[in-house]
Image (spheres, rainbow, N blue to C red):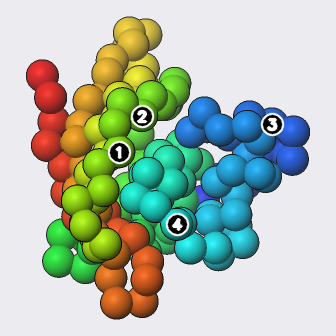
């Protein structure tokens, strides 16, 4: 499992998820241990964790029943940006977030379009369950 990349962001650098600055956006979850208040906030922080190769955060925020044992970033593509298309709160403990994440492979840009499912567990934390990909 790869360790998180050293932070190249400072308080003024834009957050990878599209938020204002990293410090005012996803750093609160990835570096300061705050609990994401919504499934959308968790999804944005997970995207940022993928950009930063932060496997511990990704595994911690993944539902135990669907979580892989490890994450490997050896062949991870460079991520180019995130667009949240929809956030649907199903009930107090279930939500869905539809997003498009852009990445580059072999000099070509690609899109990952997914509707992700999240649940809030007894400890009050949102966790990623799984998702459906769009064509």
Cα separation between marks 3 and 4: 23 Å
According to the image, label 4 marks what residue? 37
According to the image, label 3 marks what residue? 13
> Which one is earlier in the sequence, the residue at label 2 or at label 3?
3
Which residue occupies 54% across, 59% down?
54
According to the image, label 1 marks what residue? 87
Report if residue 33 is visible in the image: yes
Residue closer to the observer: 67 or 43: 43
Which quarter of the figure is the N terminus placed in?
Answer: bottom left
Which residue occupies 42% across, 89% down?
123
Cα separation between marks 2 and 3: 20 Å
Residue closer to the observer: 49 or 45: 45
Which residue occupies 43% across, 77% down?
125
Question: Which one is closest to the eye, mark 2 or mark 3?
Answer: 2
Examine the rendered structure and indicate whether residue 125 appears above or below residue 55.
Answer: below
Cα separation between marks 1 and 4: 13 Å
> Which one is earlier in the sequence, the residue at label 3 or at label 4?
3
According to the image, label 2 marks what residue? 84
């Amino acid at each position: 499992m790869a360790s998180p990349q050293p932070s190249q962001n400072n308080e003024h650098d834009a957050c990878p998820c599209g938020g204002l600055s990293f410090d005012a956006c996803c750093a609160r979850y990835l570096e300061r241990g705050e609990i994401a208040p919504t499934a959308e906030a968790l999804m944005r922080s997970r995207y940022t964790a993928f950009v930063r190769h932060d496997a511990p955060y990704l595994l911690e925020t993944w539902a135990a029943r669907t979580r892989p044992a490890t994450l490997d970033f050896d062949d991870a593509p460079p991520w180019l940006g995130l667009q949240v298309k929809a956030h649907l709160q199903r009930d107090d403990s279930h939500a869905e977030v539809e997003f498009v994440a852009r990445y580059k492979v072999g000099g070509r840009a690609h899109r990952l379009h997914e509707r992700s499912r999240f649940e809030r567990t007894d400890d009050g934390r949102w966790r990623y369950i799984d998702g459906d990909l769009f064509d």
